[in-house]
Image: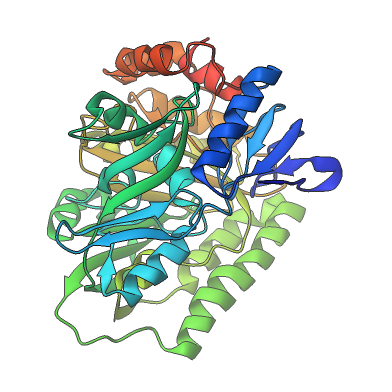
Amino acid sequence: MVSTASGKNGTWRNWGGNVSARPARQVTPASVEELAAAVGRAREDGLKVKAVGTGHSFTSIAATDGVLIRPQLLTGIRDIDRTSMTVTVEAGTPLKRLNAALAREGLSLTNMGDIMEQTVSGATSTGTHGTGRESGSIAAQIRALELVTADGSVLTCSEQENPDVFAAARVGLGALGIVTALTFAVEPLFLLTAREEPMPLERVLAEFDQLWAENEHFEFYWFPHTGSTNTKRNNRSAGPERPVGRLAGWFEDEFLSNGVFQVAQWAGRAAPATVPAIARISSRALSARTYTDIPYKVFTSPRRVRFVEMEYAVPRAALTETLRELKAVVDRSGLRVSFPVEVRTAPADDITLSTASGRDSAYIAVHMFRGTPYQAYFTAAERVLTAHEGRPHWGKVHTRDADYLARVYPRFGEFTALRDRLDPERLFQNDYVRRVLGA
């Protein structure tokens, strides 16, 4: 077991730069046994315990002044079962390593989010998702998981074994224990054809139900201060592979989407009055394109421009009304929003605190460039989103508390009762968990 310090004077910081913590100690266990021992020692010393992956959450969900567990030695594939079509992977494995390893084996996850820097346990514990008509979040693809609980025991959970824990721990917020391994459903590697094209916002909203119904994966980005969107449809393809060319890929994904966009963000931060003009230029910068490739190369893309994000899930039927209200708020507010708003969907699932738990959902994500004041915009957006019984992404900025969340999650009490049983002493609590789940 390795004890580590991260950052200046042992300070840990998240990717977005908006959360920091100074844990009493940081531990990097090399096995489940070492992790369980670290939990036991923390309990004896009266210290709280949190595990952290790559720090891609914008909330303080992983922050602690106690013991910070770093899982970077708990990585790699434990087992591939081609009969049941599952893969069991250590909790600290980054999604990008899992995706590449699965592809080498001729396998793939069914759906994934739009970045793959996170660890598998960090991504699933916070409810990370992509977009899909029938296929849900990454956590919805979990078939079993292994969990170290507050008393140091190791629980294996699935629909057959400890099913009540399985229902909750797939999106467990780090509040039930520390996930040490996950078993995902996989399928034979397939091809996706992506079709990206600009489209007027009003047309997207008017035709949204049709666009959703006709595509396996539909999403769009709306550029505030404009009536423009960029849409993306991903559908399975018989091939052949036609990946984005190296030069075109560099120009659109790196030069435009990261390089020029970064410069535009700097300009907007320095001179907010220029933001609407920059937005109009940005909304026209990306042209239509179609390409076919293996799933993770279509679902995910590099995100090198750092930002802060808030995202809410609303009932899918409420999407168009909610987005129109958000646009009206931005238009009349004097706010200067330089980042596009991302809109995705997910089908209802059966995970206790999944943002799609029990209802077909649409996601509205608002972003601001790192270092730009975001509170006024996020507060205005949150007012709109909560008016539609929005459920905040657990890893993204929000101000909701247990009272509100108990109203929008029918199974909220089921989760807190399980937490009372598994962690009665609140070993895995921090300020964020106390706020969202109650003391």
> Which is nearer the eye, 320 or 418?
418
Residue 330, above or below 262: above
Q: Quadrant of residue 306?
A: bottom right
Position of residue 53 measured from the top left corner of the image (x, y, whole percent): 56, 47
Judged left or right of residue 411, residue 405 is right
79 or 340, which is in the foreground? 79
Residue 61 visible at all = no
Q: How is the image coloured?
A: rainbow
In this rendering, the count of numbered labels is 0
Q: Position of residue 27 (x, y in %)?
A: 67, 41
Q: Write the residue at 39% across / 40% down.
A: 127
Direction right: furthest residue: 9
Q: Indicate whether 122 appears above or below 339.
A: above
In this rendered view, identify the residue nearer to me: 16 or 274: 16
Give the side of residue 32 with respect to residue 52, left or right: left
**Picture residue at 47% right of the left edge, 70% below the top:** 284
Percent x, y for residue 46? 68, 16
- Is residue 421 visible in the rendered image? The answer is yes
Residue 268 percent across, percent down from the top left = 68, 56
Above or below for 422 versus 272 = above
Left or right: 377 with respect to 292? Answer: right
